[in-house]
Image: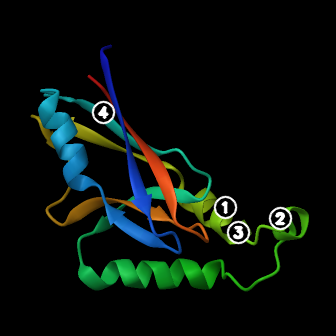
Amino acid sequence: MPTVVEKFNIQTQGFDDLIDVTLKTKNFVSKNNIQNGLLNVYVVSSCASVVIIEDEPKLGTDFIKFIQSLLPVNKVYEHDNSWHDENAYCHLRAMILNNSVTIPVIDSDLALDTWQKIVLIDFNNRPSSRQIIMSVVY
């Protein structure tokens, strides 16, 4: 099976920064003339995730508030006691949401609903440069 891979970096603000990468992924599929296949979008980080969400302005805010309530910043975590970097919550959030999504490509288009978008969420407690890897098997 042929595979095409592209990497790019995104500068984030950290602190639950949510960045839309949908257009970048659509351009990748188009540029490589992919008709049908599986696209994987992956962030190289243990403090960030890639997810698909509804393109609703306040839903992203609601989602961040929800994840913050599950894994708050101000809780004492064993990781922080060991490493003293105060970012255990970042790792835990990323572990729950995962580092990648896979989307079918059908007739040169991502199989996303009208209102779905692919986003990077950086949970880290500082700004970061995040590497995204897009790969498609067709």
Looking at the rendered image, the disc whose residue lies closer to the viewer, 1 or 4, is 1
Ranked by sequence position, the earlier of labels 4 and 2 is 4
Can you name the residue that lies furthest to the right here?
82
The image's mark for residue 87 is 3
* Percent of width and height locating residue 17: 44, 71
The amino acid sitting under disc 4 is: Leu
Q: Is residue 27 left or right of residue 64?
A: left
Q: Earlier in the sequence, mark 1 or mark 4?
A: 4
C-alpha gap between disc 4 and disc 3: 33 Å
Mark 1: which secondary structure? Answer: helix
Say which amino acid is labelled 2.
His
- Camera-nearest residue between 72 and 109: 72
Instruction: Relative to 136, say whether 51 is above or below.
Output: below
In this rendering, position of residue 135 left or right of residue 37: right
Give the spatial CA distance, label 1 vs label 4. 27 Å
Task: Write down the residue under mark 2.
Answer: 79
The residue type indicated by label 1 comes to: His
Q: Are marks 3 and 1 in contact (CB under 8 Å)?
A: yes
| Dot 2 and dot 3 residues touching (CB under 8 Å) | yes
Q: Is residue 123 left or right of residue 101?
A: right
How many other residues sit within 10 Å of disc 3, few (<14), some (14-19) or many (≥20)?
A: some
Rendered image: mark on residue 38 = 4
Instruction: Name the element at disc 3.
Output: loop
Q: CA distance from mark 2 to mark 1?
A: 9 Å
Which image quadrant is residue 114 in?
Answer: bottom left
Q: Which residue bears the numbered disc 1?
A: 91
